[in-house]
Amino acid sequence: MRTEHHPLLPSTPGARHELVSLHFGTSHARPGAGPKVYIQASLHADEVPSMLVAHHLRSRLAALDAAGQVTGEVVLVPAANPLGMGQWMLRSPQGRFEWGSGENFNRQFTDLTSAVIERCGDKLGADAQANVALVRTALRGAVAALPATTSLEHLRRTLLGMAVDADVVLDLHCDGEALLHLYSTHAGWDAGGELLTRCLGAEVALLAGRSGGDPFDEACSMLWPDLAERLGPAKPVPPACLAATIELRGEGDVAHGLAERDADAILVYLHHRGAIRLDPAPALPPTVCEPTPLAGSMPLHAPHGGVLVFLCEVGQRVCTGEPLAEIIDPITGATSVLTSPVDGLFFARERKRFAVAGMPIGKVAGREALRQGSLLSA
Ligand SMILES: [Zn+2]
């Protein structure tokens, strides 16, 4: 295992932050080497379960590396957001939005499609695999050339620089209270996403194209189908990166048993992708869920402030019109009942039990794509 330190540009004089990345195996750019896998934990710095999964991955990967069983390259960033990790106010962590700008840490990752075409479009030809190598070289250059003035911009550039040429990118997050679920792309589903869902035992897989907001995973994955569309069949470009945002249940699901299970599940996936070799070889897990459209994941919002009482547990199948929660105004006694907008799976809900007007309080995964525009929450 090799450890790399990445000092971040300070936004204010004297401030110091650094990213740390752990490297296992040998560069995937070497002939004969297996695929490159990039895994990061807690880009939203207050989403703790993934840091515990990374903790267990570190020791397992180190043992595999020492035994010569890392056949590709694995990069693990065990705490991807040192800026957000330090944002505490009145005893509460604030790891989702950067205080200086109000920006979500997992948005605004640059779409590099045009930059890649500028750098290597005229060099691409009829050989898809040769095109992948040329595109990856162009990507590394394009990320290195991105401007970065603030700590936040430098954080985004550094993370993207480590991930953008990978075959597999896993961005580990969590929800408020939730089933294990993931977000990926239509193109990625056949390029490893289906297998990842099985290995993780994810109960919901939400697929989209570009969902709006430019999250980290899409910056790594969507440029491949976008390149294929823009370059046409004469210059074939396969979906060479499977990227997924994995929601490791809820904020409070921080336990060794769960984290060890999730770390093992990720390693089973890495084995089947040829990045590591487990002994004995694990069997292919069964299919747990069919994918559903991200545009069919229907959010519920509080119509006014009040006490939030759930009438339905996470993981329940629900029907249109079924009551899921009540919002009770404690002063007037007025009560609103929130019902499911669709038939589907109630897979995620808020952890707090007091709502303010407009607050998202839960999500139901339905089968039909009903939403348009930006599909991600703030
Ligand atoms: Zn998150």
Image (cartoon, grey):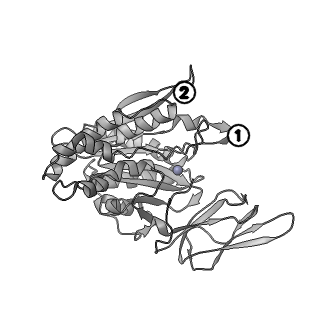
**Vertical position of residue 283 compared to residue 125: above or below:** below
**Vertical position of residue 362 compared to residue 226: above or below:** below
Q: Is residue 310 left or right of 125 when viewed as pictured? A: right
Which one is in front, 127 or 32?
127
Residue 373, image x, y percentages:
49, 62
Disc 1 Cβ-to-ligand 1 distance below 8 Å: no
Determine the residue located farthest toward the right in the rendered image: 331
Q: Residue at the spot x=57%, y=45% of the render?
A: 96
Q: Quadrant of residue 92?
A: top right
Cα distance in 3D space between marks 2 and 1? 24 Å
Residue 130, image x, y percentages:
15, 47
Q: Amino acid at mark 1?
A: Arg
Q: Quadrant of the N terminus?
A: top left
Q: Quadrant of residue 118?
A: top left
Q: Residues within 10 Å of mark 2 (few under 14, many from 20)?
A: some
Which SS class for mark 1? Answer: loop
Q: Residue at the spot x=60%, y=42% of the render?
A: 102
**Vertical position of residue 116 compared to residue 354: above or below:** above
Q: Residue at the spot x=29%, y=63% of the render?
A: 190
Give me the disc on residue 91. 1
Which SS class for mark 2? Answer: loop
For marks 2 and 1, give the one nearer the viewer: 2
Q: Is residue 33 left or right of 370 when viewed as pictured? A: left
Give me the disc on residue 11. 2
Which one is in front, 169 or 115?
115
Q: Residue at the spot x=50%, y=59% of the render?
A: 374
